[in-house]
Image (spheres, rainbow, N blue to C red):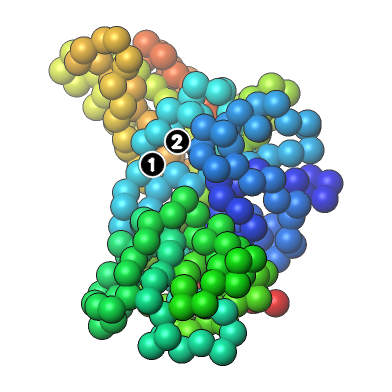
């Protein structure tokens, strides 16, 4: 990726940007913001070949983002990689203020909900839901809002000249989000992809044992099924797609199992083959 143009849901300083920085080993990319995941998909669909996107797919507290799995399938995007980010929320405000000076705190509703235990100590602070953590920080800085705080990343505080009043205010320390690096589907030949993890969609007959038959092929090959998610087939009651993450050691072994699964499924699609990411603590630093 030349100069690493990355589309994110959110704005510079959002956790999506932190995920992109982590994936790129500390390189800060050119960020193309999108207000929603659907807008992100449209921007990627119409982008040039040097542009990719980072999209959250699951959170250890909130669970899977089902609409994003549907977006991957609808737009035919390819998963090129994954990254896990430890979500650490921080309270920030204009320099020179203390927590006791705040009457209002703004942030994305998910960020607020993940910090409620902290804010119970400050009942005088009103919690206001906004569209984005980083955008809230930007608005506080641009409008020079006294008495108003934000919840977001350390990078957001740095970008917008805010002072961090309290770090790590999230209720649970086990708060990780998994992100996909995605690209347009055209030009990607699955047979040429390399990695040790694959994401696939499949659909089987609605009959006893059909899904189990496909799963048994993985067990026989000693491959790890790290995720299994079901989705209803639109317009067909009682029929489902299944999303699978499969971890393996050799590409040859994966293709052997893939051929066996294909023989017992109605539909089978590879969303991506990539290197699996490790879950570990990370926070942006200069």
| Local crowd size for mark 1, using a 10 Å CA cut-off: few (<14), some (14–19), many (≥20) | few
| Local crowd size for mark 2, using a 10 Å CA cut-off: few (<14), some (14–19), many (≥20) | some
- Taking depth in this image into account, of 16 and 113 the one nearest to the observer is 113
Confirm or deny contact between disc 2 and disc 1 (CB under 8 A). yes
Quarter of the figure with residue 225: top left
x then y, percent, for residue 280: 48, 68
26 vs 119, left or right, is: right
Q: Which element is circle 2 on?
A: helix
- Taking depth in this image into account, of 11 and 180 the one nearest to the observer is 11
Check the image and report above or below for 10 versus 281: above
x then y, percent, for residue 199: 48, 35
Residue at horizontal 82%, vertical 50%? 3
- Taking depth in this image into account, of 231 and 11 the one nearest to the observer is 11
Residue at horizontal 15%, vertical 18%? 208
Quarter of the figure with residue 242: top left
Disc number for residue 68: 2
Check the image and report above or below for 65 versus 168: above
Is the C terminus in the top left, top right, bottom left or bottom right quadrant?
A: bottom right
Q: What residue would you read off at disc 1?
A: 65
x then y, percent, for residue 180: 54, 45
């Amino acid at each position: 990726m030349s100069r690493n143009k990355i589309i994110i849901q959110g704005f510079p300083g959002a956790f999506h940007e932190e995920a992109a920085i982590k994936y790129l080993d500390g390189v800060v990319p050119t960020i193309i913001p999108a207000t929603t995941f659907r807008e992100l998909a449209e921007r990627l669909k119409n982008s040039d070949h040097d542009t990719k996107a980072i999209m959250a797919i699951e959170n250890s507290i909130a669970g899977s983002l089902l609409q994003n799995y549907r977006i991957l399938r609808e737009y035919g995007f390819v998963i090129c990689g994954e990254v896990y980010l430890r979500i650490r929320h921080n309270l920030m405000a204009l320099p020179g203020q203390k927590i006791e000076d705040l009457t209002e705190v703004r942030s994305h509703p998910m960020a607020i909900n993940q910090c409620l235990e902290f804010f119970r100590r400050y009942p005088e602070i009103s919690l206001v839901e906004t569209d984005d953590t980083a955008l809230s920080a930007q608005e506080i800085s641009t409008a020079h809002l006294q008495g108003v705080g934000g919840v977001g990343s350390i990078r957001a505080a740095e970008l917008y000249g805010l002072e961090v009043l309290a770090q790590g205010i999230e209720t649970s320390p086990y708060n990780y989000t998994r992100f996909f690096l995605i690209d347009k589907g055209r030009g990607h030949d699955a047979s040429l992809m390399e990695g040790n993890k694959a994401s696939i969609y499949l659909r089987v007959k609605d009959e006893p044992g059909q899904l189990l038959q496909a799963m048994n092929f993985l067990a026989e090959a000693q491959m790890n099924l790290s995720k299994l998610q079901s989705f209803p087939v639109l317009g067909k009651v009682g029929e489902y797609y299944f999303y699978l993450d499969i971890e393996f050691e050799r590409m040859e072994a994966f293709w052997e199992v893939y051929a066996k699964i294909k023989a017992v499924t109605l539909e089978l699609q590879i969303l991506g083959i990539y290197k699996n990411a490790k879950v570990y603590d990370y926070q942006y630093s200069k």
